[in-house]
Image: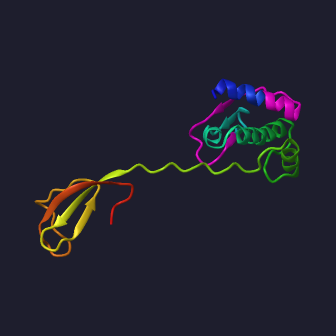
């Protein structure tokens, strides 16, 4: 869905659910991480987290849009659009908006490359993210000589 399609969707939902037009800007903001959407008091724009559409579908997106439109219409009517007010909660319940947005799904961590070094004397293993100069570094346990063994690909540092 593009920003233009989102704008049309918000305008349609505003007319159908609230009976009032939405005359400002609605757009996707990929920088939103922990919230589903945001209403800006200064310019009356609505920003929506695009992950709400990709991760949870259009039904959740519509619920979030209704939530932000509750802020919008209450603010333009001169009332407080805060979550704790009775007017906000009643309007949100009337239009069927979401009270809370679902938590964004966490991205899977990328595997990293770990360098494995082994002490020649005691066999102690050392995993490092970066290569080290074995002519300067020694084993912390017995002060023996370290030897680079191999590169290991893993999400976390191997044990």
Check the picture and name the quadrant holding the C terminus. Answer: bottom left
Number of numbered discs? 0
Where is residue 48? Give x, y as percent: 66, 37
Compared across the picture, whether 132 is left or right of 96 comes to left
Query: By what rule are the colours in the image chosen?
Result: rainbow
Compared across the picture, whether 114 is left or right of 20 comes to left
Range drawn in magenta? 12-38
Q: Looking at the rendering, which quadrant does residue 136 occupy?
A: bottom left
Where is residue 93? Give x, y as percent: 86, 47
Check the picture and name the quadrant holding the N terminus. Answer: top right
Where is residue 98? Give x, y as percent: 77, 47
73 up-or-down from 82: above or below? above
Q: Nearer the viewer, residue 151 or 17?
A: 151
Q: Residue at x 23, y 67 (%)?
A: 125
Q: Nearer the viewer, residue 81 or 123?
A: 123
Does the magenta portion include 28? Answer: yes
Q: Looking at the rendering, which quadrant does residue 121 occupy?
A: bottom left
Q: Nearer the viewer, residue 55 or 6?
A: 55
Does the magenta portion include 32? Answer: yes
Where is residue 104? Give x, y as percent: 60, 48
Q: Residue at x 58, y 49 (%)?
A: 105
């Amino acid at each position: 869905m593009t920003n233009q399609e989102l704008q049309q969707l918000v305008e349609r939902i505003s007319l159908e659910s609230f009976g009032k037009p939405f005359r400002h800007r609605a757009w996707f903001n990929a920088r939103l991480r922990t919230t589903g959407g945001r209403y800006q008091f200064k310019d009356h724009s609505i920003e929506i987290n695009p992950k709400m559409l990709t991760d949870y579908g259009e039904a959740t997106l519509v619920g979030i849009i209704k939530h932000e439109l509750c802020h919008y219409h209450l603010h333009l009517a001169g009332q407080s659009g805060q979550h704790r007010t009775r007017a906000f909660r009643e309007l949100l319940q009337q239009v069927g908006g979401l009270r809370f947005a679902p938590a964004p799904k966490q991205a899977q961590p990328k595997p990293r490359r770990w360098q494995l070094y082994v002490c020649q004397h005691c066999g102690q293993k050392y995993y490092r993210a970066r290569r080290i100069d074995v002519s300067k570094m020694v084993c912390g346990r017995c002060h023996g000589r370290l030897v680079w063994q191999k590169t290991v690909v893993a999400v976390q540092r191997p044990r």
